[in-house]
Image: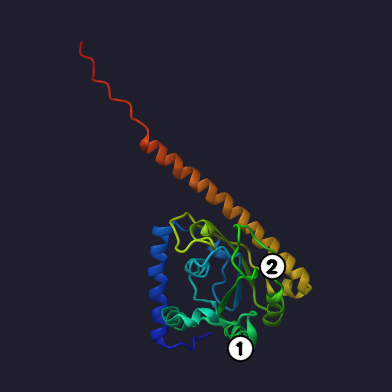
Amino acid sequence: MTSSRSLPKRLWYVFVHLACRLSAVVAFRVRVEGREHVPVCGGAMVLSNHQSHLDPVLIGLACDRRLNYLARETLFGFAPFRWLIHSLDAIPLDREGLGLTGLRETLRRLKQGEMVLIFPEGTRTHDGEIAALKPGFSALAKRTAVPLVPVAIEGAFHAWPRWRLLPVVATIHILFGEPIPPEVTQAFGERELVVEVERRIRACHALARRQRSLAEGRQRGDEASDLSPKPKAQSPTTH
C-alpha cells in the first residue's frame, strides 16, 4: 500500500535508518538472525522483550522495512526528543498505556499495511530477564488480523541497564522468530495467545543469549591469541 507520508519524511527515515545501522554495528557489534521471518509487505505486529532505551532503535535497524514506534508522552516534553519523535511519526502512549488516541492510530497504521513495534512487558527489565507479558496486545492482534512476529534482543541490558546514565559498548544480538499467522491468532483465546507469544519470545531470547555468549567467547579467544607471546623464529642451521 502506498505510504501517505511526504517524500521528505520518507527520505529522513531512510537517512536516519542507514546512519544508525552503521553506528550500531560499530559501537554495539549488533548481529541479527532470522531477518527472513519479517514479512516483506503488509501489516504486522513485532513483539519484543524490552532490555533498554536502545531497543526500539536497534530492532528498527534490524528491519529492512519501516517500523512504527510507540513513545511515552513524557518523552515529548524534552524538545530534542520531541522533534525526533515527531519526525519519525512515533505513536504517543499515555501513562496508563496505549490510550484511545494511540490505539486508533496503531489500528490505522496496521490496516494501512505498516509494521508496529510493541513491548508486551510494558517496561524495561530490571535484571535482563523477561517478565510476564501484559495482555493488552492480544485484543489488538485479534482485531487487526495481522501476523505477529516474535523477536528477542540480548545484550542491550548490558549496554544500558536502567540505573546507568549513558550506554556503554556491548555485543548485542537480535533474533526474529517465525511469525504467528492471523488464522492461528484467531484460533487462540486472548489469554492463550499471550502465553504462546511469551513462549516464542522466550525461545528467541534463549537462542539469542546462547549465540551472544558464543560470539563473546570467540572474541575473548581471539584477543587472548593476539596477546600471547609468539615463538621466536629459529635461524636456519648452516652445515
State the residue at coordinates (49%, 89%).
4
Residue 171's place in the image compared with 14, above or below, is above
Q: How many marks?
A: 2
* Percent x, y of residue 22: 38, 64
Seen from the viewer's position, the closer of residues 198 and 1 is 198
For this view, does 232 lie left or right of residue 130?
Answer: left
* Percent x, y of residue 159: 48, 58
Residue under numbered circle 1: 101
- What amino acid is labelled 1 in the image? Thr
Quarter of the image where one finds residue 50: bottom right
* Percent x, y of residue 117: 57, 73
Label 1's element? helix
Q: Residues within 10 Å of mark 2 (few under 14, many from 20)?
A: some
Residue 198's place in the image compared with 229, above or below, is below
- What amino acid is labelled 2 in the image? Leu
Residue under numbered circle 2: 133
